[in-house]
Amino acid sequence: MELKIDLISKRRKTLFLVFGTGLFLIASARIVLYIFGDNVAKPFDWIYFGIFALNGLFFVYQGLEETYLLINSEMIVLKNVLFEKKLCVAWNEVKAINYRMNRIEFVKTDDTMATLYFDTFNYTSVQKIRETIVEIAKEKNL
């Protein structure tokens, strides 16, 4: 059994891309107008347009970034926050699974713990995640 959940909807990704591209184009257009126009750009203007352009690039990056949860018979992979490492837990490394109210804790064979928090998921997604993990854990005799 396999479960894949996209954490950012396609509509929201599209919104990030359009908004970020718009911010970047506005900043670029203003810079071009200052360069080829009669106006003299002051240092504050350059800083303001630079921050505006960087903000636009950040939104574009958010629109392109993959945030997902993948659970299959080989591993569990969670990528939910920008600029943060993925949580990867291979099923062959799992010694025990502790189910808590707002998280699932995977105890690995080297006695470290990986935790899957449910704070970014809605109720139906949490139920699907629990069902999938229970089913795969039964197959793996955990």
Image (spheres, rainbow, N blue to C red):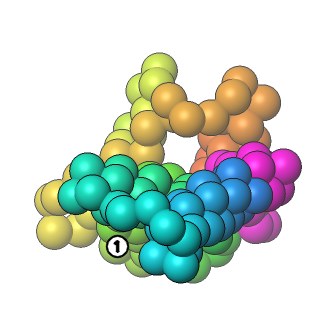
Report the residue that reaches farthest toward the left: 111
- Which region of the structure is painted magenta? 1-15
**9 within the magenta span:** yes
Q: Residue 91: x and y, percent? A: 47, 71
Badge 1 is on which residue? 93
| Three-letter residue code for mark 1 | Glu
Tell me: 124 left or right of 99: right
Tell me: 63 left or right of 112: right
Q: How many marks?
A: 1
- Residue located at (47% from left, 21% from top): 101
- The correct choice, above or below, for 8 with respect to 24 in the image is above
Q: Residue 97: x and y, percent? A: 41, 47
- Residue located at (26% from left, 50% from top): 44
Give the secondary structure at mark 1: helix
State which quadrant residue 107 falls in.
bottom left
The one nearer the camera, 17 or 24, is: 24
